[in-house]
Amino acid sequence: MNVSADIKIWDPLVRLFHWALVAAFFIAYFTEDDWLSWHVVAGYTVLGLVLFRLLWGLIGTRYARFSSFVYSPGATLTYIKAVFTGKAARYIGHNPAGGAMIIALLLGLLATTVSGLMLYGADAWQGPLAEWMKDSSDETIDIIKEVHEFFANFTLFLVVVHVFGVLWESLLHRENLVLSMLTGRKRP
């Protein structure tokens, strides 16, 4: 990769957000019960990062803004079909499928963290929702726990699809997208 010919795409905040989210999500995913304090801190970190990304998607740099990568469902489906035929156009920022994945991941993470806050309040009587959730029945706690686990597992599924998509796009367009999320640079 010729750095002097490359252009800056991903700002430092987007890159820091991305890799911090990877770490926090996996810490939260693989800790609970015996490691509840780690799980809670990682969960709060995920929520804070998601809230930051929602704000940065509105006011951030060019390629960080939602307006640069949220496409219509039709455009996204057309792009996905082109990917499977090997004829997908290259995008400097996120392509339509990548944009849809970002939205899906943010929604999955938001559902996971909000249900986690509800469960923490209902089951442990702690956290910002404890006052509202402390009188929850065992049945309600079980339902919230199932919802929390569903969204955590669904988000993990989305992460796996995201990684495969990044690898596929890297091969399709002969560029290292993982490296670009580390350096912030891509070829024009």
Image: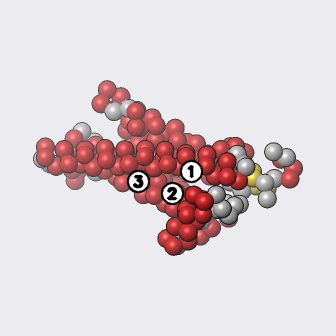
How far apart are the alpha carbons under marks 1 and 2?
9 Å
Q: Which residue is mark 1?
A: 165
Q: Is residue 163 visible?
A: yes
Q: Residue furthest right?
A: 4
Label 2 SS: helix
Q: Nearer the viewer, mark 1 or mark 2?
A: 1
For residue 174, side relative to residue 51 (left or right): right
Labelled disc at residue 128: none
Residue 103: where, in percent of width, then height?
49, 60
What crowding class fits label 2: few (fewer than 14 Cα within 10 Å), some (14-19), or many (20 or more)? some
Q: Which residue is mark 2?
A: 101
Q: Residue at x 46, y 58 (%)?
A: 104
Q: Quadrant of the C terminus?
A: bottom right
What crowding class fits label 1: few (fewer than 14 Cα within 10 Å), some (14-19), or many (20 or more)? some
Q: Residue at x 19, y 45 (%)?
A: 141
Labelled disc at residue 108: 3
